[in-house]
Image: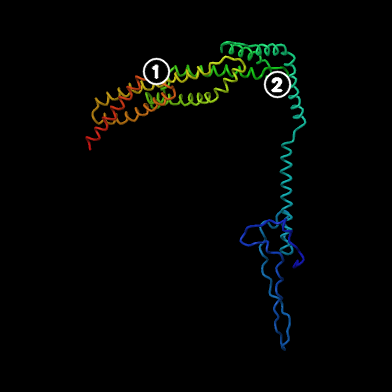
């Protein structure tokens, strides 16, 4: 069948396929083949001769003969049948996938029951805590409201005691919602105590650099060892300290207003100043270790000969310059050097100048 009356699906239902040939242009079936040739018979008459034998059938399209794909009739009909079968398969696959997904996501009755029971148990625990610990919570709330400590040690003592008492609750926030709990005041107390602890620890860690054993621990097991490892450790610690201190200094006024509003003692300003001053311990340790190590290596190089001394001085100059720059950054962070750091900084500067001058003289002499 030529299938002249067959139509393509509407444009809205067709996909544009970007092949070399635009299949959307094929809006009508191909014309029918020409009639067979006429062969003349004897007597000048004409007879219709037998048509030439038909050629081999065209090869089947990909996928032909498989599944529900049937290729019969005109090109248009064949195309329509193929597309309908393909869409039917796709819908079936999609439906199956959705069914499998739904089966996976399906909540079993037992799961729902377990979830409800768990939620019910959790809510019941909160109710039990409200009833059981109600008197204790009201007493703690009263103590927080009337607190008028004169020192941060008093704040620490109150916060530690209240936290120990609240630790018995299954969910602190949920249970306290049932009471007139001074949440803002107590959260500020907690923050004041936590900041005091944090800054106190920071100051102690900086002060540890005074201890030779602590400095040995810092460089133990490092690849470079000695003054280079000490410089790297100091730089890492100061990076952490400076980042946190600058953050607190930006928040300082807001924090002080909160502490004042809640009538809480605060040493935040003093502790920040103490951190700045304590950084002198790192500066002193790094400068002292670098000066001593460079002097010892210089002595060994002098005994080894002129060539070794030149190599040492080049390396020494580069390292001392790093230390000198680090020490100056420490001075800027601390605000000022103490007497020990001032002396070490002057010694470091003189030694760096000596090495630099010596290298310059050697360069001039060799040229």
Residue placed furthest toward the left: 365
- Quadrant of the rendered structure where residue 84 is? bottom right
| Snapshot colouring | rainbow
The vertical placement of 64 against 128, above or below, is below
Of the two numbered discs 1 and 2 on the same chain, state the one appearing first in sequence. 2
Q: Secondary structure at mark 2?
A: helix
Check the picture and name the quadrant holding the C terminus: top left
Nearest to the observer: residue 204 or residue 250 = 250
Q: Secondary structure at mark 1?
A: loop
Q: Nearer the viewer, residue 316 or 56?
A: 316
Dots 1, 2 in contact, CB < 8 A: no
Q: Residue 355 lies in what quarter of the image?
A: top left
Residue behind mark 1: 338
- Residue 47 is situated, as x and y percent measured from the top left of the image, at 73, 82
Figure quadrant of the N terminus: bottom right
Q: Nearer the viewer, residue 324 or 11?
A: 324
Along the horizontal axis of the image, is 272 left or right of 341? right
Label 1 crowd bin: few (<14), some (14–19), many (20+), radius 10 Å = some
Residue 80: image location, x then y, percent: 73, 59
Q: Which residue is found at the position 69% from the left and 17% from the top?
A: 181
Residue 247 location (% of width, % of height):
52, 26
Query: Which residue does the numbered mark 2 point to in the structure image?
Result: 174
Tell us which disc is closer to us: 1 or 2. 1
């Amino acid at each position: 069948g030529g299938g002249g009356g067959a139509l393509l699906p509407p444009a809205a239902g067709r996909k544009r396929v970007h092949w070399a040939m635009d299949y959307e242009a094929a809006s009508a079936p191909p014309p029918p083949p020409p009639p067979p040739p006429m062969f003349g018979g004897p007597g000048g008459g004409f007879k219709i001769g037998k048509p030439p034998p038909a050629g081999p059938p065209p090869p089947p399209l990909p996928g032909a003969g498989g599944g529900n794909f049937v290729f019969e009739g005109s090109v248009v009909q064949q195309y329509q049948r193929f597309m309908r079968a393909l869409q039917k398969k796709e819908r079936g696959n999609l439906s199956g996938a959705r069914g499998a997904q739904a089966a996976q996501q399906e909540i079993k009755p037992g799961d729902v029951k377990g979830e409800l029971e768990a939620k019910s148990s959790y809510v019941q625990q909160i109710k039990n805590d409200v009833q059981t610990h109600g008197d204790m919570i009201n007493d703690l709330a009263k103590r927080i409201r009337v607190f008028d400590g004169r020192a941060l040690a008093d704040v620490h003592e109150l916060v530690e005691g209240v936290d120990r008492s609240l630790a018995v609750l299954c969910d602190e926030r949920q249970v306290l919602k049932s009471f007139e709990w001074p949440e803002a005041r107590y959260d500020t107390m907690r923050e004041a105590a936590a900041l005091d602890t944090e800054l106190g620890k920071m100051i102690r860690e900086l002060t540890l650099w005074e201890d030779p054993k602590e400095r040995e621990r810092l460089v133990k097991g490092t690849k470079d060892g000695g003054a280079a490892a000490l410089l790297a450790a100091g730089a890492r610690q100061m990076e952490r300290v400076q980042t946190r201190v600058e953050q607190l200094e930006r928040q300082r006024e807001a924090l002080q207003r909160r502490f004042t509003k809640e009538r809480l003692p605060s040493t935040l300003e003093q502790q920040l100043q103490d951190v700045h001053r304590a950084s002198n311990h790192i500066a002193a340790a790094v400068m002292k270790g670098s000066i001593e190590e460079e002097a010892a290596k210089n002595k060994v190089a002098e005994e080894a000969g002129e060539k070794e001394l030149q190599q040492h001085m080049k390396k020494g100059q580069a390292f001392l310059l790093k230390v000198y720059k680090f020490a100056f950054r420490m001075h800027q962070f601390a605000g000022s050097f103490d007497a020990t750091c001032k002396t070490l900084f002057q010694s470091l500067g003189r030694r760096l100048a000596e090495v630099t001058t010596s290298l310059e003289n050697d360069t001039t002499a060799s040229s």
